[in-house]
Image (tube, rainbow, N blue to C red):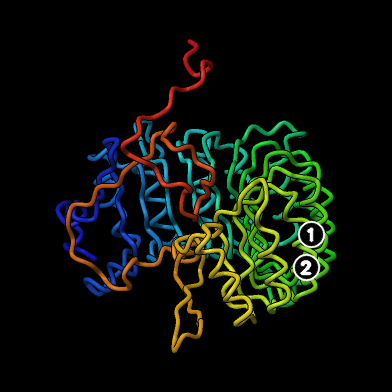
Amino acid sequence: MGEKLTRTFMHLFCEKNSDGTKNLRLKGKDLWQRIGKRLNDKDMRRVAVFLKDNLKIVKLDLCYNNIGDKGLAILVDRYLSMSDSTLEHLNLVSCNITGKGIKSLSSIAETLRLKTLRINGNKLGFEGGKSAAELLGKCPTLRHFDVGDTDQTLATVNYFMGVMRRDVGKKNSLQVLDFSRVIPICKTYQYDPASLADTLGEMLKVNTTLIELHIQKNEFDGHDVELLLYGLEKNKTLLLLDLGFNSIGDYGVELLAKWLKKRPSLLGLNISGNSIHDMGARALSFGLPFSKVRLLDISYNRIGNKGMLDILNSIKKPYVLRLFYFWGNNFNQPTYKVVNRMLQSGVLEKEHIDVKLYTVDEVLCAAYYPSNHYKHRYYCVIDHGSPVELRIKRNTIEHEFAQPRALLKFEYYDRFPVVDETLSPSTPPCYYCRT
């Protein structure tokens, strides 16, 4: 990028936070649309110098650039390895990084202060997967780790699950793990979803810190769900299970419904795109009333009116369903009428479902309503599709005890309910005041 990457240029891409910190967002797509270039390894020297001179920056977003292994090594040597590094969140999505770059980052894992690390979309290979697992085991501050869409083998999967097990003496406190879209390391490698499900279940059986588990697009079927549930039934901490776009079918949903009847701690369930029919929806309606689920995503399945009505008739329960996404199924007028009645009575809120009802010649019709921002945020999509005017942006950082109390607070979903700034934060429990 050369001389264009000046201090003034990078200051324009800094966002201010209400707590005095800053975020530096240098998204490759944004830069390409503005100046026709993306960051490369040579530009990382300027970025590292800028970070050293601006220690208030705690978040760095480099997604969809071409920094490669050399660029990551420069960032490690010239900034991340220093004792005064303040970076807490690092986004390296699709940056052409291989195992060599991850190894350089893993070499300073014990001194890193990162809370979030996203390396999905990079071709790590076996050595890269092994180094990433070592980083996870050695970095004590890491809370969110994303290794989705990376080429793994069952050997590297075992490395990852090993450092997540609390019964082998590991000290990591990971809360969010994204292990979606595991890609075999070569075309001749035989991918075995059952082994992955079994390994995940064994990890969940003894893990006591994980809150969110994202395992989309791993070709799980109903029998793999059965293997996963062996560990889930003994887990007490998991709040969000993301099984979107697998192939669990009606049998897998039936197994999940039986688990929900046991009242697990789960608050969110994503089973979108899983070829679920009316039979699976009916089975889910039997387990849902007993659960604590407040977020349910069943979009893009094959559920008809009969199955949708079964689910809609079961969502009025002690733990009220707050976020409900069901667009992309095979329903029509009978479902529209029930949804419309629930909207009018307040059982559902139009801001928290992904279907918008309207009338044409006094006939109810439905359209997609973009209330679900999960994919938009996960893939770091530009908010408006094209660059907007550069101006000072201030982000409000939520207080730990903000009111009203959060009933749902996950990584890529909107907080429910939203923070009311007119209410002062609640008094922390007494154990926070102990010295």
Residue shown at 52% from the left, 52% from the top: 102
Residue shown at 73% from the left, 53% from the top: 289
Q: Residues within 10 Å of mark 1 (few under 14, many from 20)?
A: some
Q: Amino acid at mark 1?
A: Phe
* Disc 2, SS: helix
Q: Is residue 167 left or right of residue 301?
A: right
Residue 286 - label: 1
Residue 282 - label: 2
The quarter of the rendered structure image containing the N terminus is: bottom left
Give the distance between the C-alpha atoms of the residues marked 1 and 2, in whole angstroms.
Answer: 7 Å
Q: Amino acid at mark 2?
A: Arg
* Disc 1, SS: helix
Q: Nearer the viewer, residue 358 or 2?
A: 358
Q: Nearer the viewer, residue 322 or 229?
A: 322
**Is any part of residue 269 visible from this angle?**
yes
Q: Position of residue 62 (x, y in %)?
A: 37, 58
Q: Is residue 16 left or right of residue 141?
A: left
* Vertical comparison of 427 with 402: above or below: above
Q: Residue furthest left?
A: 8
Q: Quadrant of residue 276?
A: bottom right
Q: Position of residue 114 (x, y in %)?
A: 46, 40
Could you tell me if the residues under marks 1 and 2 are in contact, i.e. CB atoms within 8 Å?
yes
Q: Residue furthest bottom?
A: 361
Q: Nearer the viewer, residue 42 or 238?
A: 238
